[in-house]
Amino acid sequence: MTNMQPSAGPAFNLEFEPRYTEAVQVTPLIRRIVAQNPSRFTFHGTGTYIIGGPEGAAVIDPGPPMRDHIDALLKALDGWQVSAILVTHTHLDHSPAARPLQEATGAPTYGFGPHAGGTANADAVEEGADWRFSPDHVLKDGDVIEGPGWTFEAVHTPGHTSNHLCFALAEEQALFSGDHVMGWSTSIVSPPDGDMAAYLGSLKKLLDRLETVYYPTHGAPIQDPKPFVASFIRHREAREDQILAAIAGGAEQVTEMVELMYHDVPRSLYPAAARSVLAHLVKLTAEGRVTADDDNTRYKLASNGAERK
């Protein structure tokens, strides 16, 4: 999720005060507690959202298994009934605290399913996969979860992970966008579970929705989100153009492309950049715009490689 963008990338918002362990009132219906797990993937940390009131609250992305964060969450929920634990996806900074939260409250968990369907390896450049999480209630796109004063629609948005969900809150025309759309950075899309074609399709899917504010799990809310989402799509299209230009110039391997495309970022970020470039190459190969050798390590332009489909 690190910011490695072409010169005309999205206008990111880096202004955010985490106020660790404090339950911050975001709207009358929404509170947020940020875990103190800052990193190049999590920005200032994982934001856990509490929606509703004492008679039955929903918790979105309980966060990492950090005792101080779990204690702060339980303190904020003291005396409250918890009706649902909603998980956007199964990276280690999002879902593990669902277990102690469920043990303390008895609330059921909701999600799309286990990480990568329970079949793939964890990504080396991400925060890691929570292979232990399996939701009590498996959600599909369009499913509705209701509680006292709140109504969520599950919006399946694969790309960052295959099991990524956003949650649309009808009462506030708001979307809890997880890691799919964040205001501080783009998302890492890392094969095999990350899928660039699916990610772009999921971005375009949001353009047809009516939500007017997004609450990502990391960073500040996103106001006027549709132009921002459109800028993400343009950003990824620009990356593809860069990759095609790099191949046309003689770069055949991912490492060579990264050197050309990310020369202005710290080399410590190159592994994450390489996963993003690979995700684009998988998409471009599937579209017939690029060809790969038998080992999928060297790439060349196909005869129609310069044409955008």
Image (cartoon, rainbow, N blue to C red):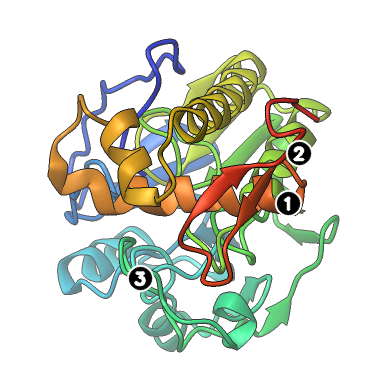
Q: In the image, what residue occupies the spot 25% across and 41% down?
A: 43
Q: In the image, what residue occupies the spot 34% across and 30% down?
A: 261
Q: Earlier in the sequence, mark 3 or mark 2?
A: 3
Q: Which residue is mark 3?
A: 92
- Type of residue at label 3? Leu
Residue 247 position in % (x across, y down): 49, 36
Q: Is residue 289 above or below residue 143?
A: above
Residue 209 position in % (x across, y down): 80, 30
- Type of residue at label 2? Ala
Q: Is residue 283 above or below residue 221?
A: below
Q: How many marks?
A: 3
The reply to whether dot 2 and dot 1 touch (C-beta < 8 Å) is yes
The N terminus lies in quadrant: top left
Mark 2 to mark 1: distance in Å?
Answer: 6 Å
Task: Work out whether residue 224 or residue 84 is closer to the camera in this orientation and state it.
Answer: 224
Residue 15 position in % (x across, y down): 26, 21
Q: Which residue is mark 2?
A: 170
Residue 207 visible somewhere in the drawing: yes
Locate residue 25: give its quadrant.
top left
Locate residue 138: give its quadrant.
bottom right
- Type of residue at label 1? Phe
- How packed mark 2 is, by other alpha carbons closer than 10 Å (few <14, some 14-19, many 20 or more), is some
Q: Is residue 117 above or below residue 38?
A: below
Residue 189 position in % (x across, y down): 50, 51
Q: Which residue is mark 1?
A: 152
Q: Secondary structure at mark 3?
A: loop
Task: Work out whether residue 169 or residue 159 is closer to the camera in this orientation and state it.
Answer: 159
Mark 3 to mark 1: distance in Å?
Answer: 23 Å
Q: In the image, what residue occupies the spot 22% across and 69% down?
A: 71
Q: Secondary structure at mark 1?
A: strand
Residue 47 visible somewhere in the drawing: no
